[in-house]
Amino acid sequence: MLYYIGRRLLQAIPVLLGTTFIIYFMVFAMPGDPLLGLFGDKAPNPALLARLQEQYALDQPFFVQYLNYLGNLVQGNFGISFSGQPVNDILARTFPVTLKLAVIAIFIEMVLALTIGLISGLRKGGIFDATALVVSLLLISVPIFVLCFVGQFFFAVQLGWFSPTVGSDTSFGKLLLPAIVLSLFVVATAIRLTRASVIETANADFVRTAYSKGLSRRRVVPVHILRNSLIPVTTQLGADFGLLIVGATVTEGIFNVPGVGNTLYQAVIRGERPTVVSFVTVMVLLYLVVNILIDLLYAVLDPRIRYVK
Amino acid sequence: MNLRKLGLAGIALAAAGTLALSGCAGGGGSTPSAGTGDTSAIILTNGSEPQNPLIPTATNEVGGGKILDAIFAGLVSYGADGSPVNDMAESIETTDSQNYTIKVKQGEKFSNGEEVNADSFINAWQDGALLSNGRLNSYFFEDIEGFSYDVDSPLTGLAKVDDYTFTVALSKPRSDFPLALGYSAYYPLPAAAFENGKVTDAFGENPIGNGPYKLASEGAWQHNVKIDLVTNPDYNGVRKAQNGGLTITFYATGDAAYADLLAGNVDVIDQIPDANYATFETDLEGRAINQPAAVFQSFTIPSDASAYSDPSAFQHWVGEEGKLRRQALSMAINREQITDVIFEGTRTPAKDFTSPTIAGWSDSLKGESVLEYNPDEAKKLWAQADAISPFTGSFQISYNADGGHQGWVDAVTNSVSNTLGIQASGNPIPTFAEARTQITGKTIKTAFRTGWQADYPSLFNFLGPLYATNASSNDGEYSNPAFDSLLNEGAATADLGAANEKFQEAQEILLQDLPAIPLWYSNVTGGYAAGVNNVQFGWNSVPLYYEITKG
């Protein structure tokens, strides 16, 4: 199994190299001089501009810039942002917040998807199932910023149950509302998937066998049906986790969460190569790690899956 | 479950747990407690993450500017109407508008106990002007003798007379120089800011100032989150704080700040999101602010076609023909209607090339009628231009698509199209940086959006950098000797009133030539909570925080 993990981690290296290269090139190829943007509508003096280009090494050819960046990256140095801060510091400040938000959201998603999906699957065609279908279709079709604004306005501004923004205090209570909204954004697919998976498993031979052996419904539903329905759902949750980290930009903006999305958005607009590439690299890394964890979880869920050489 | 499986699950769970834990660990940084001042009267407001270290000469954007203005005090500061008052200066004297003698008030201190004296200013300015330091605001020192863009050269025009007196020699007369001295680029710095003769980035992280506020503690600037300021008891200038401090929360979007204001989590905001333009004045029940700001919006059609990579793109916009077409275009735009409908009254139709918040502004300059909507006259002028040479092609305005300009550009080009019967449309350029690259690189082929936010409250600041021959931000390559000489006369006139008369005469030339077509002044939109009083916005659209009282 360690061999398996090692191999998966080694596979991550070319993926990371490829991503940094592509992202670096794309930011490089973005038209316009990022430094000109720093001066607003005021035109800077050419000598000052040249001085700044030298400072940020923007006057070098693409490959020199990229290799420099890569060289620093190998030493664990992500570079310097236009604001003069080490990108390492920015990463260390923003990723934990977004991760925390994503973990809470994925937990809410998991609880909702499993409960609603299981009940819907077991009572296929019933009133609960029909309601769940309509609600999840509704959630799928509403854009996330609408969910954000509606949630913020009703539950925070009008009812006062939550704080409308997060700001400096990234405690569980403050992150709860944005996490709920985020989870609603992805939960519909997970509910549908759980339901379909439960229906399929409930009709399987081993479930019928379990019942005919005289096992109680209380034992069959969680152990025989639910557990065997979890593999597709787990895959979905893993993919959602990546989506939540990457896709939190809108939510973070509206709820003022000092996380990855906001910072990355600003950096893209300003064409800050080191910041953009480093953020994306860490995101890819996270995504790979989560995927390996999900693959390992398969073996826990299904004894027939083994990770040997 | 066999052992192997348990191990597997253990690794997976442990790894997941680490992710979750590291997620929790980074979040709750302890908030620095307010050091001095009445903690119950901390004013909560909005801001944005400073994009540079908090060094006065390195900051040219509003996020950092707002903090610098709170923690530093310059030789002069500005009242709500932009009128200058001596703050750190005892006196600023000149006889020829070119050589100034500045006396610094004795007994003023930085928050680390250092005295504010002549050296505090001289050293800060020298650091800001030096080419190799790469300060974004270095151009503020370009009129001081010795300044160079090409080599490292000390400002020889700065001379220390005694501990509290220094002289400034400019390379040419500038009557509005004292007016400019309230801008953050001219703030003093303590000796503690320097290391080997250069202001360090570390100082910019924990700046030590001489203003009405100071940082609550070391590390009070929590990046991307907020900055905590408390009243500086050592400050004795004209902006003495009436509250215990200021907490500036950095918002990524105006929507979040507005939601916090409605929920009572913030006291004062100076930005209303576009989506709430229609409703905020009723939402806030008399606690809304909507007044013109020192921001001038326009679009520019290049005046000198030969400077551009494709001169034929502007062939109908030069000479007498171009002048007639510009005037026709200007009269074809219904500014009143567009500011009402598109901006819900949060813009004020332009009457000149400056801003109503600036002393000397006038809405009745000679030739101002060219900014009024007058379709008949517009058609007539356009026909006159067609008689010189018939118009071919279409008319386009380029704008950066990341700045929310599409609405008004479409409205303006529609207005032009309907009135003059020509094809007119917007031409979006994806990012601001690219738009600026095309404009400064002269590769642009259409008219383009231009705007100007004043750094200090002076008519000259709206005119000189934009329309003087070869001026730094003269994006349209406009040149008119008559305008230049009026501008220079004004700059050499010591009396501000008399100088402004010259500037207004110069503007009357602009109203004929229309190097840029004035559209409107941006308004500052803001609001405050029911619990705070004395909220007044300054000439530069930033609330005068020191006056605000709470509770």
Image (cartoon, rainbow, N blue to C red):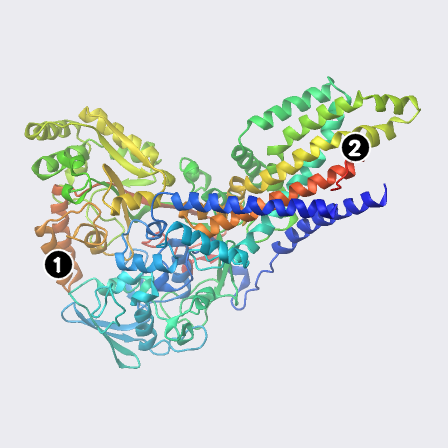
The answer to whether residue B260 shows anywhere in this view is no
Residue B408 in which image quadrant: top left
Instruction: Determine which residue is flagged by label 2.
Output: A227
Chain identity of mark 2: A
Whether B391 is drawn above or below B219: the answer is above
Q: Quadrant of the N terminus of chain B?
A: top right
Q: Chain of mark 1?
A: B
- The amino acid type found where label 2 is placed reads Arg
**View extreme (right): residue:** A214
Q: Looking at this view, is B256 or A258 the one in front?
A: A258
Badge 1 amino acid: Asn
Q: At numbered mark 1, what does the secondary structure look like: helix, strand or loop?
A: helix
As rendered, which of A5 and B176 lies closer to the eye?
Answer: A5
Could you say which quadrant of the image residue B145 lies in? bottom left
Left or right of B136 on screen, residue A148: right
How far across and how far down the image is residue B38, in percent?
A: 53, 65
**In x, y percent, where is residue B473?**
23, 51
Answer yes or no: is residue A280 visible.
Answer: yes
- Looking at the image, how many numbered discs can be counted on the residues? 2
Q: Is residue A154 left or right of residue B167?
A: right
Residue at 43% over, 75% down: B192
Q: Quick check: A229 left or right of B498? A: right
Of tags 1 and 2, the one toward the viewer is 2
Q: Any mark on residue B488, and which? A: 1
Q: Is residue B343 left or right of residue B443?
A: right
